[in-house]
Image (spheres, rainbow, N blue to C red):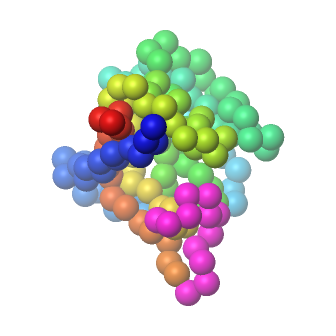
Amino acid sequence: MSYRLAVVVVALAALPLAAQKQAGTTKSAGTPAGSAMKIASATSAGPKNITAGATIAEIGADGKLVTLRAGTNGWLCMPDDPNTPKPDPICADKVWQQWFEAWMAKKPPAVKQVGIAYMLMGASDASNIDPFATKPAAGQDWVVTPAHTMVVVPDPK
């Protein structure tokens, strides 16, 4: 059985340049944000028709999700990670939520249908090689990506 997945990242050219420019200048690492600020950050990740009914949650100190706002539509949005240099909130459907649960447990995901996740403020990752890296390797820079939509599909095998 193959556990490989095809993940397609599509840059969204429709996001206003001003939002991307603002995303690069509003990061305040180390400053704890109140729930309202975290909810605003999380909802900036996706289209309003999705974020309006999404559950908003963050990862707590124990590694478990802490709900900031209950949702009604099955989507989950998470605010910016203050440990990264650029804003990187995300909104994910149920398929991506299952993918993330498997990833966090370091287990192969079992994708049965197409899933969608939004990162309309862009992202910054420590590595494109090590998905668990918390900072870039010596001599490396953060991997910064513009606004994008992620699509996960089942392995056709």
- In this view, the residue in front, 85 or 149, is 149
Dividing the picture into quadrants, the one containing residue 85 is bottom right
* Residue 91 appearing in the image: no
The dominant secondary structure in magenta is loop
Q: Position of residue 102 (x, y in %)?
A: 58, 37
Q: Where is residue 35 in the image (x, y as percent from the top left)?
A: 65, 35
The extreme top residue here reads 72
- In this view, the residue in front, 74 or 67, is 74
Q: In which quarter of the image is the N terminus?
A: top left
* Residue 75 appearing in the image: yes
| Residue 144 left/right relative to 13 | right
- In this view, the residue in front, 149 or 30, is 149
The extreme left residue here reads 14
**Magenta span of residues:** 128-139
The extreme bottom residue here reads 139
Dividing the picture into quadrants, the one containing residue 28 is bottom right
**Which residue is found at the position 44% from the left and 56% from the top?**
123
Q: Where is residue 49 in the image (x, y as percent from the top left)?
A: 33, 23
**Which residue is found at the position 69% from the left and 60% from the top?**
30
